[in-house]
Image: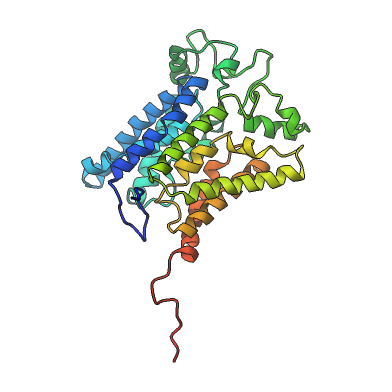
Amino acid sequence: MAFWIASSPHNHQKNETSSLMRLVVYATIPGIFAQWYFFGWGNLIHISLAVAAAIIAEFTVLALRNKKITPQLFDGSAILTAVLLGISLPALAPWWISVIGSLFAIALVKQLYGGLGHNPFNPAMAAYVMLLISFPLQMTQWQPPLSLLAMDIQLSDTLAVIFSGYTPQGYSVEQIRTHIDGFTMATPLDTVKTNMTLGLTVVESMQAPTIGKHFGVGWEWINAGFLLGGLFLLGKEAIPWSTPVSFLLSLFICSFIAFMISPDSNASTMFHWFTGATMLGAFFIITDPVSGATSVKGRLVFGALAGLLVFLIRKFGGYPDAVAFAVLLCNMAAPLIDQYTRPRTYGHDLEVKK
């Protein structure tokens, strides 16, 4: 039996919203565990901060709107938004980043439009883009994997950095991100993109320490964790298969064609699949039933468009990872996609002849 909740105009609730939200949160656990294993406690701390801020924001806005608080506060939607936002943030970002992001996602992106089911944009990704544009320095200070750090970072060190900007020993975020050889480490996507501007080939870029033996130290396993969680959701029929399959296939085709044309200036298809937020976006972001397309054909188009935009932004845009931007652009296009792909009402496709 289908488990996912369809969006309007085919708004058939096939299970309780809270049950679906809990299931999606559970499915993020493998990816979150991989984040913790390779990058430490940072994202777990940000998830906790984001969840607390999201619950406070949801309670406050519902009270101001004179809405029934308990059913909507505990339907799990605010918690899921906060979890997705916390996953997406740099591990050593300051504490107020996750708090501001959650307040923006819940109070403005979700509740300002009428609450769950009415928001035109994905709240987590809208908040992420707002943070990236407003605080580019804090939002691009990605921590290298623990195995590549020149110093040992424990839970107490991570807490100190997030809340004060420095470890108890006095090391800043920038010092933590500096390799033992003296260069600042970045994400695999950023490393390849930066090296391209310096005239290096993709093969030469793949020799960077952050890349490792495959597609990125830690990042490949994080994406594998979210892929595992996504397959779990598909198995439970909690999300429609059409959107993630279309998205991944579109990204695969675009990157494969580019790689075949010029392998020196284009990364492989598997590199695009297993770095950045690809699998998180495929199974947990673009499958949002509220801000996405509604029909099967519409979801196929929606996913394919998102995959194309991710590739184009990664290749030609100014920001290495592109999932958040691609999702918001597709959210804008969702009504138009629905207009041309939603099922016709029976009998309305025939012209009336005089």
100, above or below 333, in the image: above
From the viewer's perspective, tell me whether residue 337 is left or right of residue 178: left
Q: Position of residue 327 (x, y in %)?
A: 51, 47
Looking at the image, can residue 15 be seen? yes
Looking at the image, the residue that sits furthest to the bottom is 354
Q: Residue at x 41, y 46 (%)?
A: 239
Q: Is residue 300 above or below residue 146?
A: below
Give residue 308's position: percent from left, percent from top: 60, 49
In front here: 34 or 89? 34
Residue drawn at x 43%, y 51% is 291
As drawn, the residue found furthest toward the right would be 199
For the C terminus, the quadrant is: bottom left
Taking depth in this image into account, of 169 and 155 the one nearest to the observer is: 155
> Which colour assignment does the render follow?
rainbow
Q: Residue at x 37, y 46 (%)?
A: 110
User: Which quadrant of the structure image shows residue 147?
Assistant: top right
Spot occupied by residue 134 in the image (x, y as percentages of width and height): 52, 37
Furthest residue in direction top, as rendered: 169
- In the displayed structure, 75 sits above or below 8; it is above
Residue 123, position as x, y percentages in the image:
42, 43
Q: Is residue 327 left or right of residue 193?
A: left
- Residue at the location (46% across, 49% down)? 241
Q: Say left or right for 65 vs 40.
A: left
- Nearest to the observer: residue 89 or residue 213: 213
Judge whether residue 97 can be spotted in this image: no
Q: Quadrant of residue 189?
A: top right
